[in-house]
Amino acid sequence: MHRRHFIKKLFSLAAAAITGCFPWRLATAAWPETHFGKGELNQLFRALFGEQTLIESDDIHVSLPETAENGAVVPITISSELEQISRIYIWVEKNPTPLAAEFELDASMAVYLTARIKMAESCHVVVVAEQGQHLLRKQQWVKVMQGGCGTG
Amino acid sequence: MATKIRTQQGEQFTEIKILISHPMENGRNRDPMTGQLIPAHFIQELKVEKNDRTMITAQLGGSMSQNPFFTFRMKDSKSGDRLRVYWIDNLGLSDSAEHVIE
């Protein structure tokens, strides 16, 4: 028992020493594990946004290929002329873990970003943008030719 | 693993491009040779700072593609502004890169 405790301690000390070497170390604890959980999109939305309504918005522009040859790399561009968008979420409806990313933008950033996401199969990609108290949603269907196992 | 930053001055925006070499394994892929599951290994947090002010904080999951590539646009930035990008993954590995806007 004592020895086990000692070894545990030794490991945690070693881990602290290693991570301590990186000057820009961030707290991984900040990563919102529940947002990135498995499950059905509506359930995840309810867990994250509560009962708040998602408002369909054509002012959020989402550009994705209509057909993606390779689900491992699907380029996405999101932009908007709207002011005060502070946060953007990208969800892939049918991926086992649907949330791909969430971005928090400083007010001095334009509402514009591109990224590359994985898609396990044909489905909607749903973008949710937080504008003050409102949640704006824009979704687009993408046909995936080759999803392959584990791409999502 | 490497992190690269490039910027391009436009008329209204300064565009930032970030390319990171990283496997972004979600833990559901199998090694084709051994059939073993490849453990999850993906970037969880990415930060972009300009002159020590945080411009973007991104939380990422295993649904982001291998070798993540991002573009962002800054509304007001000037020559000499200092950008720093850093990230940390689920294994605690991290990297950072700096770039001065020309």
Image: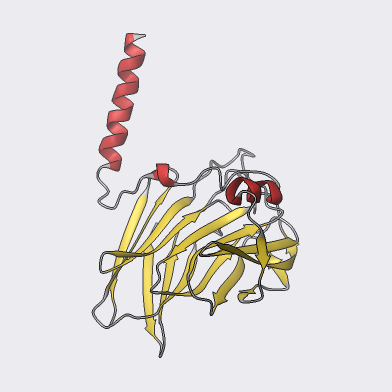
Query: What percent of the width, then of the height, locates residue A133?
Result: 54, 61
Query: What percent of the width, then of the height, locates residue A111?
Result: 49, 74
Res A34 seen here: yes
Res B22 seen here: no
**Count of numbered circles in the view:** 0
Q: Quadrant of residue B8?
A: bottom left
Q: Residue furthest top?
A: A1
Residue at 43%, 73% (x, y): give it. B17
> Which of these two is toward me, A70 or A139?
A139
Residue at 63%, 54% (x, y): give it. A52
Q: Is B43 rendered above or below residue A141?
A: above
Q: Quadrant of the C terminus of chain B?
A: bottom left
Q: Is A49 rendered above or below residue A131?
A: above
Q: Horizontal placement of A40 versus A10: left or right?
A: right
Residue at 25%, 51% (x, y): give it. A23
Q: Quadrant of the N terminus of chain B?
A: bottom left
Q: Is A34 rendered above or below residue B75?
A: above
Residue at 51%, 64% (x, y): give it. A132
Q: Horizontal placement of A10 versus A33: left or right?
A: left
Query: What percent of the width, then of the height, locates residue B67?
Result: 49, 61
Q: Is A91 rendered above or below residue A114?
A: above
> Which of these two is toward me, A144 or A112?
A112
Query: What percent of the width, then of the height, locates residue B31?
Result: 60, 44
